[in-house]
Amino acid sequence: MQAPRCSRECPQPSPSVPQEGRILKTTRTTAGEHVNKPLSNRTALITGGGQGLGFAVATKLAELGAKIAINDIAPERATKAADRIADASDVRTHAILADITKKDDVDGMVNDAVSTLGGLHILINNAGILYPTSVADMPEEEWDRVIEVNLKGTFLCAQAALAPMNAARWGRIVNFSSTAGKTVSTLGGAHYTASKAGVLGFTRHLAKEVAGDGITVNAVCPGLIDTEMSRTIIDDAQAQAYADSFPISRLGQPTEVADLVAFLASDQAAYITGAALDINGGDLMV
């Protein structure tokens, strides 16, 4: 089995799958956490938030005043990210390690975020994995693993977040899909494409279920974004070739994706739900 990789369509950190299986808790409190900003009364949980797109999103939400819970596979990475965000934005941060494919871990993660940071209003389902295996060569367990992390993990985290969001009568769930969810994956296998298409279907259905509860559910579908993860998959020449093929002839930046996610997490997006918003430089237009 090949090591998990991140796709061209949506470079993301891996999900939280700790060897010991439970929760890491590290909290930073800063003097400026009550500054009046658009999200100063909100708490956000970002899965896969230690680097790449997840870290960019967490950083942006913190800049807008949200308290931040960061979930990541690597405890050191989660803690470092939480510290960096607290230092830069003067918000309260919390690092949590939990296996997003296990219901008990996910429930514990959400409960921990709520008890430590005072609620949960924004969930960013960013964590995911990818293998480039063809259907002919794909082991059954590899198919199961990708579906379990990318789709089941999204379901479990969203399900657990509903209770605190319902209690607040306000919530924003943003699920990371991919251009692969609307077409086919360029670098990933069929399991990745299927999982990201499944995220879009789940997003629409959940959005309909909770629309009357003050909760919106949307998906973002990134194309090729210039992250640490994507640079481990393609070299400079390949990156330039991809960029040259896009109508907007460059790679996307993590901050651009973060700006879109932050908008969907805001009061300004209250009338947007069940949407799947592309951010791919025109690589896919549907």
Image (spheres, helix red, strand yellow):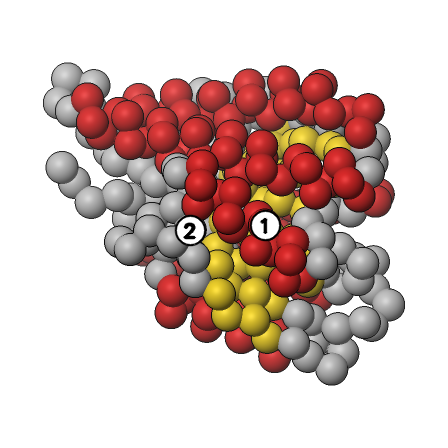
| Depth order, front residue of 182/70 | 70
Direction bottom: furthest residue: 31
Instruction: Return the x and y of residue 115 as percentages of the image width and height.
Output: 64, 57
Residue 111: give its label.
1
For the N terminus, give its image quadrant: top left
Residue 280 visible? The answer is: no
Q: Looking at numbered disc 1 in the image, what kind of residue is underneath it?
A: Asn
The answer to whether residue 122 is left or right of residue 23 is right
Instruction: Return the x and y of residue 65 as percentages of the image width and height.
Output: 75, 64
Note whether 151 is above or below 126 in the view shown.
above
The answer to whether residue 147 is left or right of residue 136 is right
Q: Are marks 1 and 2 in contact (CB under 8 Å)?
A: no
**Of the two numbered discs 1 and 2 in the rendering, the one whose residue sits closer to the viewer:** 1
Note whether 203 is above or below 228 in the view shown.
above
Separation of disc 1 and disc 2 at Cα? 12 Å
Q: Secondary structure at mark 1?
A: helix
Q: Looking at numbered disc 2 in the image, what kind of residue is underneath it?
A: Ala
- Which residue is under mark 2? 98
Q: For residue 145, which quarter of the picture?
A: top left
